[in-house]
Amino acid sequence: MTRAVDRDSPHLPRPAQIEAYGKGGFRFAGMSHRGSLLCLPDGIWPGPVTSPQELSATDVALVFASTPPVEHCLIGTGRDPWALPRDLAARFAEHGIAVETMTTGAAVRTYNILLGERRRVAALLIAVD
C-alpha cells in the first residue's frame, strides 16, 4: 500500500540536481536519501512507491497540483522499463502534462538536463539497488 505525500511532509524546499543513484537511494544537494524520490520544481520529497506497479494518481497528486503547472513528468521505473497504465496516462493528459516512463538511470539523466534548462519538470524516481 502506498502513502500519500503532501506539501507538509518533510522535504528539501528547492529543486536540486540528482548527483548519484543506486544502493537503494539517491544523493542530491549534498545529502543522501534512502528510498524513492518525488522531485518537483519547488522541492524534493521522499517518494511514495517502491515499484512502478504500486503507482496511482494519489502518489503523484503533488505533480497535478503544482502551481505554476508542471510541463513534463518523468517516471523512473527502476531497472526495468514499464508502461504507464492508460488511466494514469489520461490523468496526466487531463492536466496538460507530458509524461514519460523510463528506467531510473535514464530518468535521472533526463531530469538533470531539463532542470538545467530551467524547465518545469517533475520526476518520480524509484530507487534501485
Image (spheres, rainbow, N blue to C red):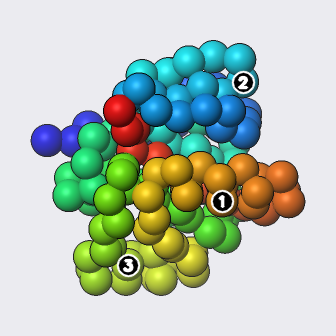
The x and y percentages for residue 99 are: 51, 73
The x and y percentages for residue 127 are: 39, 38
Give 67 or 126, whichever is nearer the viewer. 126
Q: Amino acid at mark 3?
A: Ala
Which residue in the structure is indicated by mark 3? 89
Disc number placed over residue 11 in the picture, else none: none
Specify few, some or many for label 3: CA neighbours under 10 Å numbering under 14, 14-19, or 20 or more: some
Quarter that holds the C terminus: top left
Q: Amino acid at mark 1?
A: Thr
Q: Quick check: 6 above or below 123? A: above
Disc number placed over residue 29 in the picture, else none: 2
- Among the 4 quarters of the image, the one containing residue 110: bottom right
Marks 1 and 2, the one that precedes in the sequence: 2
Disc number placed over residue 110 in the picture, else none: 1
**Alpha carbon distance from label 1 to label 3:** 19 Å
Q: Quick check: 5 above or below 10? A: below
